[in-house]
Amino acid sequence: MLLDAAESQLVLVDYQIRLLPAIFEGAQVVANAVRLGQLARLMEVPVWGTEQSPSKLGANVAEVKALCAQTLSKMHFSGVEEGLGEWLRPPAKPVGGNARSLPKHLQKPASNADERNTVVIAGCETHICLLQTALDLLEDEFDVWVVTDACSSRTERNRDAAFDRLAGAGAELVTTEMVAFEWLRTAEHPAFKSAQALIK
């Protein structure tokens, strides 16, 4: 199964100013997060952000925050506990009608035509906020793809333990380039040259 840009959303978790200096390979992780956000924008994939206790840890770095349509401030480690799921899967709009409408039992159930059930997620700290958010998304029946080279923790051991647990729970583990080329699918994609320039 390959990623499909038309069914994807990107969530960037807690790339915060005061947290990043302690993060293993923090500069490279942020560079990949920015690259992911730019790729998402090129391919019209919605981008969301989260910030853990921003009054203490600061906002997300400006390059990441600028790419997000909205950023959720949270106190729970899982963004889902604070409403991220509603952003990713807004409630279906009720079906309108009039007196001549079909009876309710004959109407098709309302569906959200723009529903995107694939969540591509990356962030810090992988073993805490990213892990808990991703596990809650899996429980809410989203397909979750974790971008490993755009994730980190204060230690490699914690990061890698999170990857093991996420894979065991059903998340797909991918890299930034895997996401880019699966969203593109072909060298004939109109965004191919721009995407290739971001990756190089």
Image (cartoon, rainbow, N blue to C red):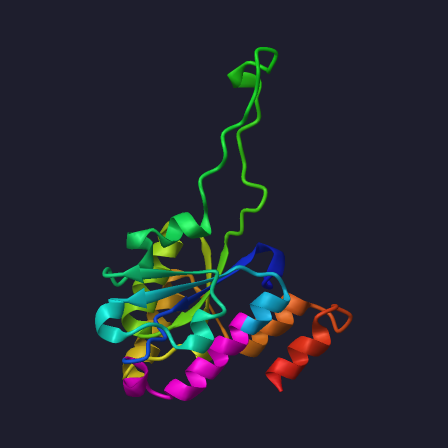
Residue 46 located within the stretch drawn in magenta: no
Q: Tell me the quadrant of the picture where the N terminus can be found.
A: bottom right
In the displayed structure image, the side of residue 157 where residue 91 appears, left or right: right
Q: Is residue 177 left or right of residue 61?
A: right
| 148, 26: nearer the viewer | 26
Considering the whole magenta stretch, tell me its main secondary structure.
helix
In the shown orientation, is residue 115 left or right of residue 156? right
199 to the left or right of 188: left
Q: Residue furthest right?
A: 188
Q: Residue at x 29, y 72 (%)?
A: 127
Q: Residue furthest top?
A: 99
Q: Which residue is found at the position 54% from the left and 40% from the top?
A: 112
Picture quarter with the C terminus = bottom right
Q: Position of residue 173 (x, y in %)?
A: 46, 71
Residue 158's quadrant in the figure? bottom left
Give the image quarter of residue 99: top right
Extent of the magenta region: 19-37
Q: Is residue 114 above or below residue 134?
A: above
